[in-house]
Image: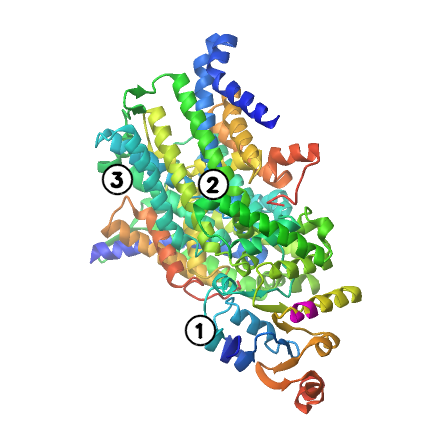
Amino acid sequence: MALFETRGLTKRFLGVTAVDGVDLAVEAGELVSLIGPNGSGKTTLFNCVTGYLAPDGGRVLFRGQDVTGAAPHRIARLGVGRTFQLVSVFPRLSALENLLTFLQQHQEERFFGRLLRAPGVRRLEAAAVERARSLLDSVGLGARERAPAGTLSYGQRKLLAFAAALMPDPELLLLDEPAAAVNPTMIEQMKAQIRALHRAGKTVLLVEHNMDVVMDISQRVVVLDHGQKIAEGPPEAVRRDPKVIEAYFGR
Amino acid sequence: MIDLLEQLVHGLTLGSLYAMVAAGLALMFGVVRLINFAHGEFYMLGGYAFWYAYAVLGWPYPVAGLAAVAAMGLFGLAYERAVIRTILSRTWHVQLIATLATSITLTNLAILLFGTQPKEVPTRLSAAILDVGGVRLAWQRIVVLVVAVALFAGLEWFVGHTKLGKAMRAMSQNREACAVVGIDVQHVALAAFGLSAGLAAAAAAVVSPLFNIFPDVGALLTLKAFAAVIVGGFGFVKGAIAAAFLIGLAESLAAGYVSYAYKDAIAFVVMVAVLLVRPQGLFGRRIGI
Amino acid sequence: MRGVRWVAGGAALIAVPWLVAAVLPGQQRYILHVLVFTALFGALALSYDLVVGHVGSLSLAHPAFFGVGAYGAALLATEARWPFAAALAAGLVLAGLAALVVGVPMFRLTEHSFAMGTLGLALVTQIVATNWVDFTRGPLCVTGIPKPQVGDFRITTLPGFYWMGLATLGLVALLYHGLTTFRLGRAFHAVRDNETLASSAAIDPLRYRMLAFTIAGALAGGVGALYASYVGVLCPGELSVSLSVNLLVMLFLGGVGSLRGVVVGAAAFTALPEVLRMAPTWRMVIYGLLLLVIVIRVPDGLEGVLQRRTGRRRGPAPGA
């Protein structure tokens, strides 16, 4: 059974079908890229499977469980992490607090435990701080843990958002254009991070425009055009697929 | 039957009033994406301007009305310059609180200047009764409806046929693109405030002979007009006008047949009901003026 | 060191009635009266700031919850002869329930619509309080509201009310602190700053908004009940929209989202006009202008100015 699956997923906006009956399956431990020309429905698909948009048709399954139309926070709680195309952080929280925010809901939901800072919650918090520090170190932001996220540079915020998504140790990580609008050094750093995740056995689905990144790190590539899946396979095979070439260069 | 018809006539008067205020509110929202909480106070000040010109200075009715419109038009321009321009680039929190603060300031200034005692401005037309098959109504109510319809027709023509009006329509559809194609965004915003304040004053000039003018008339009026803007689909002027008439009629019927004391709650009940059933408003989310 | 400062500060606050009696014997009643108001409005402003400052929803419904608690407790105490503690608890619970019930539909609205919807709610509450004469006595006001009494312990003197106000403010401040820091505070702030991102962090935005809104409503009701008991008379005018405006001035004057800022704002707001002894109308004109200038020029209030002075500022101001 695939870890994550969409069956006939469809989303329409004002008569335009942005995602058109897409079947997609990602096995546990896979690193899959979703590519396609602008407006081919990649981000819409991301938003449908993470609960930000309600699909008009089809189903979304996570570990065989139907999560179609569930609220974003419920899907997140099941172990699906994501980042956003436009870099998204909590600007007034510190870098460290940004990361802590991402783990706490997975740990202890009891209101009074939190209000009164019960010893159990304090222990969880201490462990979370430790994990957050090591993740900040791993993306090179260890020295900036107390800085409000809004004061970090664009690239740093991108790394922070990436680290935050890793905080709850998600089983499936959806990355929306991790290499967009960052400098070449940062791209290499991002690639290394994603590869490390893959080696650690995580499942990653990424939307990416940078073909070098896609061809370099993906095990499998899925191509969308006009909301439909037009090709799927290993990077080399997809690169030579006439339908893909047509979609990218034919118009 | 007669009773029902009279309630409907009252409802049309109320609807005209709410529509003139709501149209300005929707126009401002369309052009600068800001809700002016002080809009009801434009009506209130317009009413006092009219009262001053008509009852104190003794000017003829049409002249006094036009003077009030002109005065408030200028006031709207000044308000845009002094307050709105400084908050346009800020968050909606700041915008809302700043316009709310203006509303409080103006209301209490009016109390200082004119006292809390309502001003009555009867005219010959508000005393003259027209009898149509047993339905008795003041001629002034006809004036209200005719002026309101004429103003909406004029507004429609203005937005469709003049350069400034077309710029307003364009801005309500896409503000960023307007700056790119060389529309003077600031200039259009200024004009929209002048126009909206003028509309509110026109409403005051025709409605004041029927309803009294008092300093805190604006708060409820802003709420009702805003309810119309929401019900009509945010920033869609024609929708707001239609919704305002709907609210006016509902309020009048409720006052007649349900409870007079609670008539002011009707607009709010209608607004919440619509928002819960159709959050995009009755006429859909068509941004445009 | 910090502990010592807290104890000393607390002792000084408790000793205020004696200090005032010693330093300004003729003015004691007046000063204590202003301080009772300061404490009660400080508590009310803190409860309001939970919604405005920490989950970022500009509710204007606070007078409604204040009114539900005040009227609920006052009517139960006068008509049904409930004991003070029971009436106070009922005021708290009724206002909290009211917030819970109206919060669900209200939070379907966003930004301006939410503000307008809640404003409408406040207006309707006031209309009901004015017109439901059989129940609320309308403009005739509820009179003869009994003073606080638990068993044989009664609060009748001004110093007694001062300590009651101080205790209320202290309790609300403790709760405020607990809610707005640590894990709960982080979740509130995440919802306030970026709702989309918060839900990707498994935070349910509606749940946290409702939590803040309901607790704030209940606290406002509790303060309303105490206020009615202190003043002894409750009129529909107390529920007017100008209460929201006053609370907004306190918040923005002192500093939205900051415990110290809000308390300082409430104190400055309550004490200033009493000192200046202005006519109420002039007061509202000045508040309006003050609010306008503050929100445009110094949206982070006195607290922001203080922090800039001491160089301890964190992040941009809420309204900036």
In space, the residues marked 2 and 3 are separated at their CA atoms by 42 Å
Q: Residue furthest right?
A: A185
Say whether marks 1 and 2 touch (CB < 8 Å).
Answer: no
Q: Amino acid at mark 2?
A: Leu
Asked if the stretch drawn in magenta spans residue A198, the answer is yes
In the image, residue C76 sits, relative to residue B269, either above or below, namely above
Tag 3 subunit: C
What residue is disc 1 on?
A66
What residue is disc 2 on?
A116
Q: Amino acid at mark 3?
A: Trp
Instruction: Give B10 or B275, whichever is nearer the viewer.
Output: B275
Q: Secondary structure at mark 1?
A: strand
The residue positioned 68% from the left and 61% from the top of the image is B179
The rendered magenta stretch, by its main secondary structure, is classed as: helix
Q: Which part of the image, by quadrant, shows the C terminus of chain A?
A: bottom right
Percent of width and height locating residue B122: 36, 41
- Horizontal arrangement in the rendering, residue B142 relative to residue C192 (left or right): left
Say whether marks 2 and 3 touch (CB < 8 Å).
Answer: no
Q: Which residues are magenta?
A: A195-199
Percent of width and height locating residue C245: 48, 37
The residue positioned 55% from the left and 25% from the top of the image is C6
Q: Is residue C77 visible?
A: yes
What residue is disc 3 on?
C132
* Label 3: few (<14), some (14–19) or many (≥20) C-alpha neighbours in 10 Å: some
In space, the residues marked 1 and 2 are separated at their CA atoms by 37 Å
Q: Secondary structure at mark 3?
A: loop
- Horizontal arrangement in the rendering, residue C299 relative to residue A116 (left or right): right
The residue positioned 42% from the left and 29% from the top of the image is C168
